[in-house]
Amino acid sequence: MNFSKEEYKSRLKKVQASMQEKGIELLISQDPSNMNYLTGYDAWSFYYAQCVIVHVNADEPICLVEMIVRSLVDYPDEVSINETSGESIMILEITVSPEDVGKVIGKEGRIANAIRTVVKAAAAKLDKKVTVEILTQK
């Protein structure tokens, strides 16, 4: 995060106050600049499905791909997502605890393939190539 925890909380409270004022209960943002403002997540990419979800009364915003992966694992605090750009492809690296790799891959790779399907569907709409890799922490 490129700013302090206090700045983070201040930004979130400003957004939530504006939401409350306008009668908005749930905000879903797909804009990388808004996601960066709210969370510090540097996702300057339109290559895969990503968004931040803010509830007017929640303590934290939610990043969709990260939320999906965190909901599958026993050690959600060890989940991280990193983007790497190659010459002709975007690589989305999902890193999880060694104990959680099987939960993210799933039986016969079904869960990993479902995650890849969502990511590739969004990328195809933008005529981009993307791959998803599941890594373990060392």
Image (cartoon, rainbow, N blue to C red):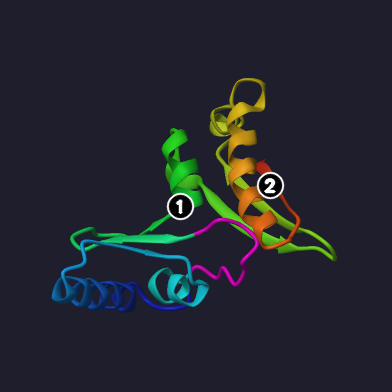
- Rate crowding at label 2 as few (under 14), some (14 to 19) or many (20 or more) other CA atoms within 10 Å: some
Looking at the image, do the residues carrying marks 2 and 1 touch, with CB atoms under 8 Å apart?
no
Which residue has dot 1 on it? Answer: 64
Closer to the camera in the image, 24 or 40: 24
Sooner in the amino-acid sequence: mark 2 or mark 1: 1
Q: Quadrant of residue 18?
A: bottom left
Q: What residue is at 55 percent from the left and 30 percent from the top?
A: 99
Image coordinates for residue 44, horizontal then vertical, percent = 60, 72
Q: Secondary structure at mark 2?
A: strand
Identity of the residue furthest to the right in this view: 87
Q: CA distance from mark 2 to mark 1?
A: 15 Å
Task: Report the span colored magenta.
Answer: 41-50
Image coordinates for residue 100, horizontal then vertical, percent = 54, 32
Image coordinates for residue 76, horizontal then vertical, percent = 44, 42
Q: What residue is at 47 percent from the left and 66 percent from the top?
A: 30
Closer to the camera in the image, 24 or 112: 24
Amino acid at dot 2: Val
Which residue has dot 2 on it? Answer: 132
Q: What residue is at 59 percent from the left and 41 percent from the top?
A: 115
Identity of the residue furthest to the front in this view: 125
Can you see residue 136? no
Q: Secondary structure at mark 1?
A: helix
Image coordinates for residue 55, horizontal then vertical, percent = 25, 59
Callout count: 2
- Rate crowding at label 1 as few (under 14), some (14 to 19) or many (20 or more) other CA atoms within 10 Å: some
